[in-house]
Amino acid sequence: MQRQRVTSANERELVGRVLRHLGLPVAVEVERFFRYFRRVADLRYASQLQCQRYVGGQSARRALLTAIELGRWVQRAPRQLYGEVMASSQIGELLMDDLRYAPQERLEVLALDAKHQVIDRQTVFVGTLDSCPVHPREIFRLAVMTGAAALVVAHNHPSGLAEPSPNDLQFMRRLAQCGRLMGIPVLDGFVIGLHTYFSLREAGILPLKQGANKSEGLKSD
């Protein structure tokens, strides 16, 4: 079965298709759904009372809301990257899938082994809409606990712009300096926007050049 994304152009059709499978009269129920929720995406911000009024004691309507919530969870679930060795461009694209629509700033860390295979991935911090204060110790605690030989760090910009701020660059340089002292190099740092990403490695900022081994970098495309 071919996967079909929900868009503003086809969401009524897709909701109707689910309602048909639930045994509800499609025309009437589609109108009811979009009377309570102008768009499928509005369900994310709907109150419990609003959902209860829409359901109106009808279990099939509750099943529809549950199905939509399950689909949203699948969309948000982070992709497992364990064991893979990838170029910066591949990591950037995969992280975009997971972070581009996040409403708050999230900072994620990928822990790599000596062969640059991913051995762990964790969200270290979830911040406010426009700030993500985090200390290097939280990041290197993960590195030590997992036995990481190197790290890749990424965070999203809810504004949708992938250009790193001066604070982003200052933080990443500080992080890279800590990594060099600990012998756990930071190989790349990503800023994830809505339509693109910024890689500090691709920009020549990471890994740190002074005293760094050329073999530290991720493989190039």
Image (cartoon, rainbow, N blue to C red):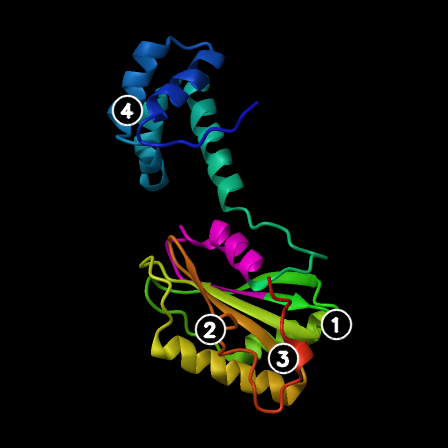
The answer to whether 56 is drawn above or below residue 125 in the figure is above
> Which residues lie in the magenta part?
89-109
Q: Choose mark 4 or mark 3, whichever is in front.
A: 3
Please report the residue visible at 32 percent of the width from the left and 41 percent of the height from the top.
Answer: 45
Distance between the Cα atoms at labels 2 and 3?
17 Å
Of labels 4 and 2, earlier in sequence is: 4
Of labels 1 and 3, earlier in sequence is: 1
Q: Which residue is mark 4?
A: 34
Please report the residue visible at 62 percent of the width from the left and 72 percent of the height from the top.
Answer: 151
Q: Position of residue 22 (x, y in %)?
A: 48, 14
Of labels 1 and 4, earlier in sequence is: 4
Distance between the Cα atoms at labels 1 and 4?
53 Å
Q: Quadrant of residue 127?
A: bottom left
Distance between the Cα atoms at labels 4 and 2?
46 Å
Q: Position of residue 135 (x, y in %)?
A: 49, 79
The local crowd at label 2, few if under 14, some if 14 to 19, many if 20 or more residues have their Cα within 10 Å, is few
Q: Choose mark 1 or mark 2, whichever is in front.
A: 2
Q: Which residue is mark 1?
A: 114
Tag 4: residue type? Phe
- Name the foreground residue: 58 vs 19: 19
Of labels 1 and 2, earlier in sequence is: 1
Of labels 4 and 3, earlier in sequence is: 4
| Secondary element type, mark 2 | loop
Is residue 32 located in the magenta-colored stretch of the structure? no
Q: Which residue is mark 3?
A: 185
Q: Which residue is mark 2?
A: 203
2 and 3 marks in contact (CB < 8 Å): no
The quarter in which the N terminus is drawn is top right
| Secondary element type, mark 1 | loop
